[in-house]
Amino acid sequence: MTGAPAQYKADVIVVGAGSAGSVVARRLADAGASVLLVEAGPQGRFPAVDDPTRMHELWDSPLDWGYRTVPQEHAHGRRLHLPRGRAVGGSHNLNAMIWVRGNPADYDDWAARGNPGWAWQDVRPVFARIEAVDSAQGEARGPLHILTGYEPSPAHLAIVEAAQQAGLPFNPDYNGASQDGVSFMQFTIQDHRRLTTADAYLGPLSGRDGFTLVPGAHVHRLLFEGERCVGVEWERDGVLERGLAGHEIVLSAGAIGSPEILLRSGVGDAGELAAHGIAVQADLPGVGRNLQDHWLVPVIAGTDRQIPASHGLPRTQSHLFWRSRPELAVPDLQPLHFDAPLYERWMEGPPDGVSLMAGLVRPASHGDIRLSGPAPTDPLLIDPRVLSEHADVEALAAAVRLCQEIVAAPALREDWGAYELYPGTLAETDEGLHAYVRESVVTYHHQSGTCKMGTDEAAVVDPRLRVHGVTGLRVADASIMPSVTTGNTNAPAIMIAERAAEFMTS
């Protein structure tokens, strides 16, 4: 890499063309700003992305960053895979397309922590503006189509019936008045094809003057003049390039990528940066801290009946929200169900079956992301500290027991010949169940919180998403969540991006 870097110029540079960055870019372009959107991955159509049934093919593919955690002390020393999207569309290319707004209490808690403008009454209209869906909440016509009212697979009809037989109420709309109960999922799917925010938001920008998309751009660092962030430097095809922003730069690289870029640019804990020889631009100890995620543990049953293939829908179509302890004010469990047996590498079993993935969505365990060295090629040290708080083990154990009850209910046991395979005899005692939880826990793909919003010493951005200690720089993605939302995080990340665009254009 020799010579002066090629340079782009725009009013605003957005880093990351994923669920959040695509939204920010579209809204700012619509407001008349010139926008430069840079993305590390490729642009294009990928059959395994478009087909909702092929989600699992994408993990550890060229479209996945393929992050691994450091060995997890409380999960039998395993290094857990954290799939993250590396293409235009971001992790919306890799996820299960499930649309969950979150619990109103999530946002009221954010506001109560000193973040005005983020209470449920503030963000609910933003969700309505995003969605194109007919629901109990009324008709909405936003850019992103939300699929409801489809015909679920026969196995999922049985799972939902079994959950009701186990004592859970049926909830026709978990994005409505209450999350509680078992429901059929709502999806970002249109015409049997995955619909990402890149499809819905960036599509209309194609060919528009003032909008430039640069794919294949691996960002190295942010550029500063004094306290002001003025540009971005990236590598593309082995060549260094730069973009200069006339107004602002927005990081939407996700809960792993955004803190990494900040740290490599000298924004983070001063002691950690100095240890790697990185000049300190702003001493913000909270960068990379407060890492939160949701966690899953499989409950797998074989079936005597053959499970029919799904067409145009993912293998997961139903889930439930419930509480590990009845006194909890908000559900902390979200098991999701697959009409296929999802065996871990050490498991074996028949080809026909169902998986009820016992899910924890209000974890007590928090971790962090740190640098292993100053170079962009130095791997990150990602440590979620999964199950480091025993309360999370207890909650997941309760979720497993609930899923076992559903598998044993007549709609599955009698009508489908369901028989439990895992945990099976491994969980005959509480000690055995806890060991199984630690051996089999995996990510729910919802990393968040690493650039926390707030005004305390651990906060990275203020309530308008401006990075503390510098000017001209915002973060808009799941990393700004003070606490992870109750449910899948794609919808909240898109809402956060809409709010960022509002702040920048108002």
Image: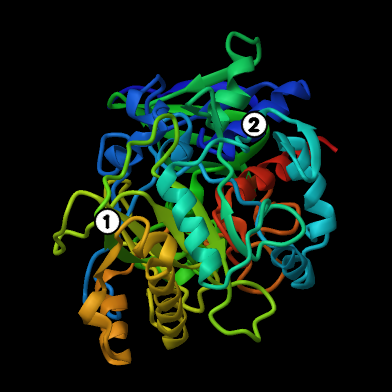
Query: Do we see residue 462 in this rendering?
Result: yes
Q: Secondary structure at mark 1?
A: loop
Report which residue position mark 1 lands on: 303
Task: Point out residue 67 in the picture as x, y percentages from the top left corner.
Answer: 31, 52
Residue 88, placed above or below residue 157: above
Task: Point out residue 108 in the picture as x, y percentages from the top left corner.
Answer: 77, 67
Residue toward you, 162 or 423: 162
Residue 490 located left or right of residue 174: left
Q: Residue at horizontal 51%, vertical 72%?
A: 166
Residue 292, placed above or below residue 23: below
Q: Nearer the viewer, mark 1 or mark 2?
A: 1
Residue 195 located left or right of residue 247: left
Q: Amino acid at mark 2?
A: Leu
Q: How many marks?
A: 2
Task: Point out residue 345 in the picture as x, y percentages from the top left corner.
Answer: 16, 59
Residue toward you, 468 or 481: 481
Q: Secondary structure at mark 2?
A: strand
Report which residue position mark 2 lands on: 144
Query: Do we see residue 257 in this rendering?
Result: no
Q: Amino acid at mark 1?
A: Thr
Residue 173, placed above or below residue 245: below
Q: Residue at horizontal 68%, vertical 28%?
A: 143
Colouring convention used in this rendered image of the protein: rainbow
The answer to whether the residue labelled 1 contacts the one labelled 2, judged by CB atoms less than 8 Å apart, is no
Which part of the image, by quadrant, shows the C terminus?
A: top right
Cα distance in 3D space between marks 1 and 2: 36 Å
In primary-sequence order, the first of circles 1 and 2 is: 2
Which residue is situated farthest in the front direction here? 414
